[in-house]
Amino acid sequence: MLKHDFSAVENLIRTQLAQMGIASLSLAIAQGNHILWETGVGWADRAAPRLADEHTVYSLASISKPMTTTALMILVERGLIDLDCPINKYLGNAKLTAHLGDVADATVRRVANHSSGLPLHCHFFYEDEEIDRPHMDETIRRYGHIMMPPGETYQYANSGFGLLEYLIERVSGQSYPDFLRQEIFIPLNLPRTTVDLPANLKPYSAVRYAQNGKHIPWYTFDHPGASAVWASAHDLVRFGLFHLKTHLPDQKTILTDASIDRMQQPTVRSSEQSGYGIGFRVTEDDGGYLTTGHDGAMGGVRTRLILVP
């Protein structure tokens, strides 16, 4: 394996973070089955103070989505979920309502590729406010309204991944955090990957800061399946290697290669250069490479996972 010198890149990162007032950045780069470079720059917590490194745990925002669909595909492989069945089949007393098209066409697959007809949706709940996240049935009654004929239009919808989280819980009989921990994080040996942030990982986590440098109060959402996973750069690159079908010796096979291919096969066009599969965006980038992965952005965090098959 050739030795790579990333010092110029690291110097650029340090300069840019200082100029932009960003607290920290962590990254990892892998090729084949080797991590070529991983590091952290800046302060994970300015008040502590605590420096960031490749094991610092960050809020992943929408990179939670491929984590959720990995769990979904585990249940598909077990024959417990049919991607092409209406998602209402797997919900409880509260069901989706269609204002255009046929609600039966809002299948699990279409929810997972953002073509179910659900509109754009974000709902955050902050710890310094009195309103708590409602039960998912109540969220479905409020916001589970299909506004476009299913299958016709790509519309990014966090609420759909809230439904997938709920589906995973109902079908597996486990909570969403427990299922992901037992079926993904432990088998893939990702010790600093978690849903939300338990007390044992808080000392290793990056504080979410606003653009003005102030600490953002803790928040959650009514769509954790879209947004609630935290991970270190070290763990995230190892998750990415699994989805490149790189079978690391300390990782168990939680999905077949065929299921990984299904996840990265675009089934709806999201832009001129991009399509969306089952929780993965597939894009031809500016360099002509076909890449797959996801990015994420919300208060205090910006993330990106890029895979080059």
Image (cartoon, helix red, strand yellow):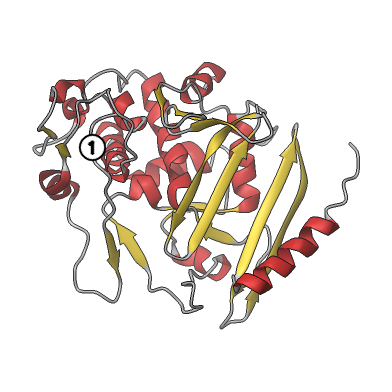
Q: Nearer the viewer, residue 255 or 112?
A: 112
Q: Nearer the viewer, residue 177 or 49?
A: 49
Locate residue 101 relative to residue 185 in the image: left or right. Answer: left
Residue 52: quadrant of the picture: bottom right
**260 to 15, vertically: above or below:** above
**283 to 131, vertically: above or below:** above
Residue 43, image x, y percentages = 63, 73
Residue appearing at x 49%, y 61% in the figure: 301
Q: Say how many tags the image has.
A: 1
Residue 234, image x, y percentages = 65, 50
Residue appearing at x 56%, y 19% in the figure: 257
Quarter of the picture holding the C terminus = top right
What secondary structure is marked by label 1? Answer: loop
Residue appearing at x 22%, y 59% in the figure: 133
- The answer, for residue 251, to whether it is visible in the render is no
Q: Amino acid at mark 1?
A: Leu
